[in-house]
Image (cartoon, grey):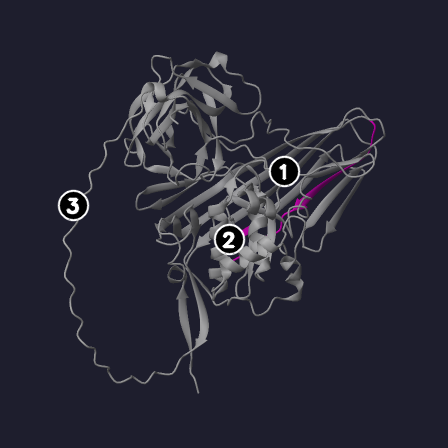
Amino acid sequence: MLKRLKAALIASLLLAALPALAENFTVKGEMDSKIHYELQHQIVAGDSMRKLIMSFVEPSSFDSPTYSQKITNFNITFRPDAQEKKTIRDARGNKTIQATWTDVPGSIDAVVSFDAQTSTGLKAIDSVAPFPLAFVPGNLKDYLQASEQVQTNDPAIGELSQKLTRGAKTQFEAVQKVVSYVVDHVRYVNPPPQYDALYALRTGRGNCQNYSHLTAALLRNAGVPVRIVNGVTMNQPFNVSWEKGTLTFKMGQGRHSWVEVWYPDLGWVPYDPQNMQFFISNRFVRIEVGVDNNETKNDGLVRWAQSAGARSKPTLQETIGGNFLSDSTKVTAQRQAYGPKNLLLGPNVLARLEVPAAPEPTPAPPVPVPPVPTPPVPAPEPPRPVPPLKLPKAWEYKMPFVFGNLEYPENVDFAFPRETKAKGKDSFEMSRNFLVETSEYVTTNATQYAQVVELTRPVTIDQVGLALHKFGGEGWIWVDIFKDQDGKPGDILHTTQMISLEDISGKPGYRWVDFKFSDKEKPVLMPGAYWIALGFSGTPIMNWFYTYGKPVGPVYGTRYKSVFARDWSGALNYEFNYRVVGMTVK
């Protein structure tokens, strides 16, 4: 009779065949915070409004192997108070407070507040969940089904899901292969024209909703239950130390979508398929769950009815605030030789599977091997001459050139980002969206920031544009171009002309500010890496917009340092929006 044994299947061995240039980091440590959260809604009513309904979801406490949150002191107030209030508990367990006005006032203020104790523990985790799953409880079957935004049954989704998970023996391995694919093949843009899984698969583009929906579709097709989570992120950065310096992670302060994956031995485990597997940081606050983002829309939902012929609709200003009452983070990372090419963090997971032991084989008698004659070694070929590099002449720069991280929500007022949707005759709604102001204050006297630009062809530069917003101050700003020195900014090579802050608009939103070179000083840059940074004098208050992930450049291509330090040892998890405009050769 065969004996049973436990064979440890370590994820690093299972995934050793993935690309060598991996950016997979195993992280360990602790993150603990207490956050006072406050959401403010101010509605100015439209004319001829017959009814207005506001909905907010009360977040629940939650516990998982890596992330937990404890919610206390929840409170919600309306001024003026609603004529009717009720609490609704849906099939997903979400608790929604619904307030209704039938005599609609000219303006309404709503304030939601609570305290969240959030903790992230990054210790080694043991899982014995096999793949495919042997059993899924009946109450989780909805999280295996297709929906409008999670097209689980689409043939393209099914084909890719089977390809990615083929050969996986443990659930962790199957999930990691899917998440690694999403991390490497979806580029962050906001807002995309569609938020569903198929759009992300076909275009390789999307925001946090697309990342979540595509991950859910691929895993549900493979028989793994996945639910969509809506919540908020705080813009408090945190650092991860590794052997080459510091990785700094920062999110915008606003709404965010991620997923939770069900393991039969661990329960629900959070994943943010933009860059985190098997955990989320303690900068996340979990609010609402469902099968997709069309279902998880009740937090902050506004609905109303107007008389026919109404001339104006209501406006909504939303402010999300978070005050850290306490905060402690200590996280270290070790880079692995397997995994995706783009950045992915996760704790050490040992995926174990019970398999029967094979009987000891009977050794076969040795077979004599005839000697093999050694073939003669051919004489080495003489080295081929390398033709000299032909540098382009000035008159050859005739092709227009535009390059950079070009896509961002230009001229958007983030205080009023919502769109109105018709929901029947004279009925409308405004639901939450995921347009988040992701930007860095870059004219501080304490920290310097730089963005890499990798050119693949020679270019003569006319101007460098940065996606900026002026909050105030006075003075002058310009752009410096640095040479690359071992993957970090080196000496300054070129400087653009200066722009006075008086010539920059202060209206809401971010837009291109183009820094030009004079005709006599246009630099000619050969293929290679360069760095750009905003220089300034006076007291300008400027924010530079950034995109999650690295849409264009390498993982370590956004750097920062203290103004007193020499080494640009800090790397950021995002990429600033910039454009380089000039002429190149055909």
Out of 123 and 226, give the one closest to the viewer.
226
Q: Amino acid at mark 2?
A: Tyr
Say which quarter of the image contains residue 581: top left
The mark found on residue 433 in the picture is 1
| Image x and y of residue 81, in percent | 76, 35
Image marks 1 and 2: residues in contact by CB distance under 8 Å: no
Instruction: Work out how far the residue at label 1 is from the one at label 2, CA to CA, in angstroms.
Output: 25 Å
Q: Amino acid at mark 1?
A: Asn
Out of 96 and 301, give the one closest to the viewer.
301
| Image x and y of residue 147, in percent | 67, 52
49 in the magenta segment: yes
Disc 2: which residue: 67
Q: Earlier in the sequence, mark 1 or mark 2?
A: 2
Query: Mark 2 against mark 3, which lies toward the viewer?
Result: 3
State which region is magenta: 48-71
Instruction: Work out how far the residue at label 3 is from the one at label 1, CA to CA, in angstroms.
Output: 65 Å
Q: Is residue 159 above or below residue 421?
A: below
189 in the magenta segment: no
